[in-house]
Amino acid sequence: MNPEQHKLKLTAVFEPEAEGGFTCRFEELPEIFSEGQTVDEARVNLWDALEQVMSYHREEARKSAVPGAVSEELQLAAT
């Protein structure tokens, strides 16, 4: 299958908080979560949390990279 035909979808869940605002998480990655005063703010913060976690894991993986391993960056687009 052609890589351009693959689509990765994450499901963001926004839960209202009693004191106001929203907490949010990805159903598929519950360890990544955030919050915001509005759904839009929470969404931006959730993407930021995802980027931070991915950056951390990328740096950690590069520390123990196997010599001769091939790395390839795949671009994922939000819809």
Image: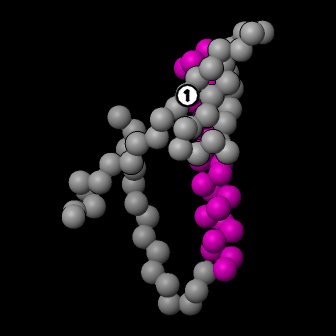
Whether 49 is among the magenta residues is yes
User: Helix, strand or loop at disc 1?
Assistant: strand
Residue at left 47%, top 75%?
71
Could you say where residue 30 lies in the image, as x and y percent from the top left? 63, 42
Q: Residues within 10 Å of mark 1 (few under 14, many from 20)?
A: some
Q: Looking at the picture, how far across and down is residue 65, in whole percent?
A: 61, 81
Indicate the quadrant where residue 72 lies. Answer: bottom left
Q: Position of residue 48 (x, y in %)?
A: 61, 39
Name the residue located 78 percent from the left edge and 9 percent from the top edge. 19
- Residue 75 x, y percent position in the rendering: 39, 54
Residue at image location 43% in from the left, 64% down from the top:
73
Image quadrant of residue 64? bottom right
Type of the residue with mark 1? Val
Q: Which residue is mark 1?
A: 13
Instruction: Reply above or below: 70 against 3.
Output: below
Of 52 and 30, nearer the camera is 30
The range drawn in magenta is: 38-64
- Can the viewer see residue 41? no
Left or right of residue 69, residue 4 in this image: left
Quarter of the image containing the C terminus?
top left
Residue 73 at least partly seen:
yes
Residue 72 sits above or below residue 53 on the image: below
Please, is residue 74 above or below residue 18 in the view?
below
Q: Is residue 47 magenta?
A: yes
The part of the image, by quadrant, that contains residue 1 is bottom left
Q: Which residue lies most toward the bottom here?
A: 67
